[in-house]
Image (cartoon, rainbow, N blue to C red):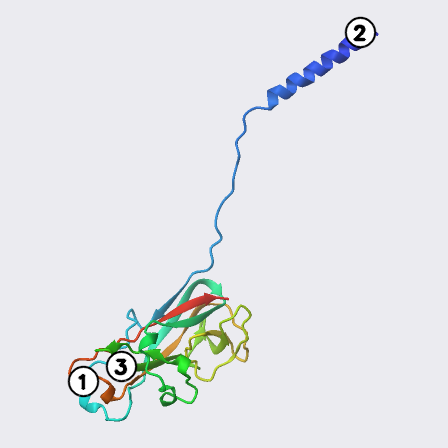
Amino acid sequence: MHNVIARSAFTAIAALASAAVFAGPSAELKVTGVIKPVACTPTIGTGSAVIDYGNIPAGSLTPGANKVLDTKEVPFTITCEAPVKMAVTAVDNKAASKVTGLAAMVSRNATESSMFGLGAAAGKNIGAFHFSMKQGSFTGDGVAVNTIGSAVSATPSWSTVSAGGMTTGRMLSWAPAGSTTPGSYRVVSGTLSVVAILNKPENLDLTQDINLDGSATIEVKYL
């Protein structure tokens, strides 16, 4: 009996010694990284995002009437790192300068919220401009697509747009032909159409140069 007890005590001591050998200092291995959203870059024109109407003679303005300037068209492209569903929204950077009541002079589809300020000179608002993603001109990865629109919302309701006018509070996207569900594209390209309308000459200070100073920001929104 004595030998059995001694043998059991020895076994316990050996186990404790073994545990002490393997329980040493430790090092933690971490695995980190960031999954970044696909980046998309919008490009207006061929390196310059300026729509220049050049010199407009004051004598070409008619008293009591607004002057509608020529429609200008420039290429518009969104290039992404990989195919992604995206939309564009517009912010009027000169909203306080917008002359109201000019939308009907653009088209029957234009609304007040699709008009953007043209800046001010000598405290006088110069006018307003309208711009659109020209329907029928766009392709997604080289294939014709529909321009579609929705109110800016966490749960968009998309529908086909007739003219593709950019409107504050709304967004435009692109869908396969015959669909109103945004598609995933790496490159979307088409035509950006711009038309500016001037205030009536009696509301402007024509004794000095008046520089048109419209500005809008086109933002890409990932869907």
Per the image, the residue denoted by label 1 is 206
Alpha-carbon distance for marks 3 and 2? Answer: 109 Å
Q: Earlier in the sequence, mark 2 or mark 1?
A: 2
Residue type of the residue flagged with mark 3 = Ile
In x, y percent, where is residue 99?
32, 82
In x, y percent, where is residue 146?
48, 78
Per the image, the residue denoted by label 3 is 126
From the viewer's perspective, tell me whether residue 121 is left or right of residue 83. left
In x, y percent, where is residue 196?
31, 83
> Which residue, as the protein is rendered here, is positioned at the far left?
207
Alpha-carbon distance for marks 2 and 1? Answer: 119 Å
Per the image, the residue denoted by label 2 is 3
The answer to which image quadrant residue 14 occupies is top right
Residue for point 84% across, 7% down:
1
Of residues 201 and 221, which is closer to you in this image? 201
Q: Earlier in the sequence, mark 3 or mark 2?
A: 2
